[in-house]
Image (spheres, helix red, strand yellow):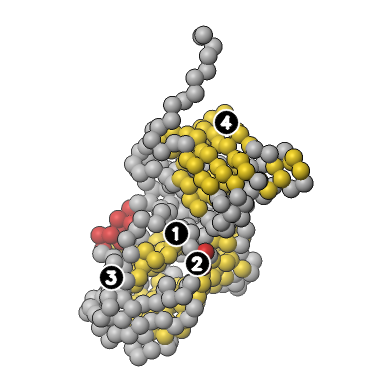
Amino acid sequence: MPNEIIPLKAGPGWPIVHLNGGVAKSTTLKNGSRGVSSHWITGYQLDGALATGDGFYLLRRSCVHFPGTSTWTAPDSGTVFDWGTEAANGHFALEMWVYIPTVTGAVASLMCRGNEASDGWKLEITSTGKAKFTAHDSVASMTITGTKSIFDRWHLITVVAQRGSATGLNLYIDGVLDAVAVDTRDLNLTLDGGTTVVCTGVSGKNMWLGPIGIYIGASANLSAEKVLSNFNEGIGRKYDGSETGLVAAWNNDEGTGTLCYSINNTDGLKVTIAGNAIWSPRKQSGSTAAVNKCGPPFEKVGEDDAEDPLPTLGLFGTGVLTTSGVMSSIQRSFPQAIRIGGNNPVRILETDGAFSLLLFGLTG
């Protein structure tokens, strides 16, 4: 039968089966592959008691745009963000991707928890674009200030605080040391002030927020080699939860709604964006300025900015109503396979439907 169509043989790991089970959370079903191979989605099937809002997203390049005094607020779900004592190896590290134009100027509270003058920490940007980090354990304090302006480009700011070391507090910009190390030996106590981690914008000014990761504990003492390695993963690097010492991370790429989901799907760590914060881009024109505002660009082997130029996200799940608010089973084959790269994973955003999803595809 010369016209016979033979279905593609499934490779290891395919199809992907997801049973939502009525659980309200965000779940990443497929992320970008390592190296030069790629995942390709060729079609899907949605089944179950589908409400009209149910579906899944192929996330694309996207980030949070602060056009003023917007806020990004992460609850700590208890004591997740507490620094332990020096004796308990209460080390700390913060990775944060930001894009701040020169005209925005100083950002007084780029990220903070508690009160850096009494019990807590704060990362800020000075009027000349230098990163500055301050921490206080209710008895002693420490401060480190960078030397390089971070204005007008996407940059990765990394702060590493190793307790009990004469050179324990270090500040890196794009994987490279940006300040003389600071002594941490006077800070012996816990840092547990505050109940949220908050990023705050500047009135009447713009800035863009990319992925953020927080490391705490014995494995949070990131070496200089590890800091550089994380940067070299690419400016568009996203967290997948496999990072040692990571207690929470947000890729800030949802592109819709007012929530940013923790990559470990912990409901208590969902971030709320408020004020006039919006998702960027609303549309993508292809110009350099537009691409810059889509989130950090790719710098990975086998990937560049020419890859994945599609809109910010796509929702798959539209169907024909069988009864009011309920859809029938949906099966779709794509005319062209859709590539799943590091900056466009397949993710179920927060839903409470008891539906099932099968993703068909291949890796190669």
Mark with earlier residue (2, 4): 2
Classify 10 Å Cα crowding around label 1: few (below 14), some (14-19), many (20 and above): some
Give the distance between the C-alpha atoms of the residues marked 3 and 1, in whole angstroms. 19 Å
Q: Residue at x 44, y 83 (%)?
A: 193
Pick the front one: 126 or 315: 315
Disc 4 marks which amino acid? Ser
- Quadrant for residue 84, please give it: bottom left
Disc 3 marks which amino acid? Ala
Mark with earlier residue (2, 3): 3
**Which residue ends up furthest to the top in the rendered image?**
1
Do the numbered discs 3 and 1 sit on residues whose CB atoms are within 8 Å?
no
Mark with earlier residue (2, 1): 1
- Rendered location of residue 108, percent (x, y): 50, 77
Pick the front one: 315 or 108: 315
Q: Is residue 273 visible?
A: yes
Identify the residue position indicated by label 1 in the image: 264
Do the numbered discs 2 and 1 sit on residues whose CB atoms are within 8 Å?
yes
Give the distance between the C-alpha atoms of the residues marked 2 and 4, in whole angstroms. 35 Å
Q: Identify the disc placed on residue 333.
A: 4
Q: Residue at x 34, y 41 (%)?
A: 35
Mark with earlier residue (1, 4): 1
- Rendered location of residue 49, percent (x, y): 65, 46
Q: Is residue 103 visible?
A: no
**Which residue ends up furthest to the bottom in the rendered image?**
139
- Rendered location of residue 157, percent (x, y): 39, 65
